[in-house]
Amino acid sequence: MNRSYIFRKLINGKTPPVNFEVNGHAYDMGYYLGDGIYPQIATIVMAIKQPDSPKKYKFSSMQEGARKDVERGFGVLQQQFAIVKQPARMWNPDVLAYIMKTVIILHNMIVEDERLPGDWPHEYDSRSRSAPVNISRVGTEELSRMRAAHRRHAIHNKETHFRLRQDLIEHIWSNFGDNY
């Protein structure tokens, strides 16, 4: 985790701000779906290996479905763009992030170009264009270190990990229940 590009950006405050509420609790960090190989931290919501209730079973099956969708998405990108298939261990993480963003944008442009009028209505099709917002990230080095320490502590908070997962279980159950 210490060498992870994603978590390093999160700790250093270089990720977009995220604020959401689930089951009456507010959260200020995004989360990733994971499996049992990851530590119990606030930004990874792990599947339940052996669900012991209908709510937990529903959560696990929906999470597994979302993870499969992501894997299929990467499969599509690998089919369209050979660079995604190549080994990348020796590449600079900033270059890898740039490549992946470029590939995803190109894929979305292809899909949008090929769609017929009226197909797949997107929210951005009807949205009004607003002026860009400028965010200043200027601060002292000491303040940056304090913020990073706070974020590192928040990420490693196991209570948040378990509360978020339980909130997501309740949210999914209240919205989908026994329906699949």
Image: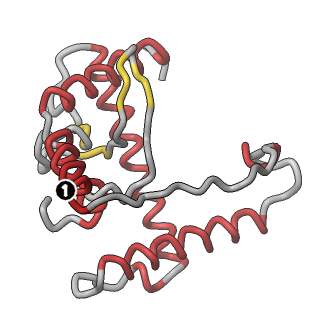
Displayed quadrant of residue 162: top left
User: Is residue 135 positioned above or below 85 on the image?
Assistant: above
Q: Is residue 86 left or right of residue 159?
A: right
Residue at left 22%, top 82%? 89
What percent of the width, then of the height, locates residue 86?
34, 85
State the residue in front, 60 or 157.
157
Residue at left 42%, top 58%? 137
Q: Which residue is mark 1?
A: 145
Residue at left 46%, top 79%? 99
Q: Is residue 138 left or right of residue 148?
A: right
Query: In the displayed image of the protein, which residue is found farthest to the right?
Result: 117
What percent of the width, then of the height, locates residue 73?
48, 60
User: Is residue 127 positioned above or below 96 on the image?
Assistant: above
What percent of the width, then of the height, locates residue 18?
43, 41
What percent of the width, then of the height, locates residue 165?
26, 27
Q: Quadrant of the N terminus?
A: bottom left
Label 1: few (<14), some (14–19) or many (≥20) C-alpha neighbours in 10 Å: few
**Type of amino acid under label 1:** Arg
Identify the element where label 1 is drawn.
helix
- State the scheme by which the image is colored: secondary structure
Displayed quadrant of residue 87: bottom left
State the residue in front, 32 or 134.
134
Residue at left 49%, top 57%? 136
Q: Is residue 117 left or right of residue 92?
A: right
Q: How many marks?
A: 1
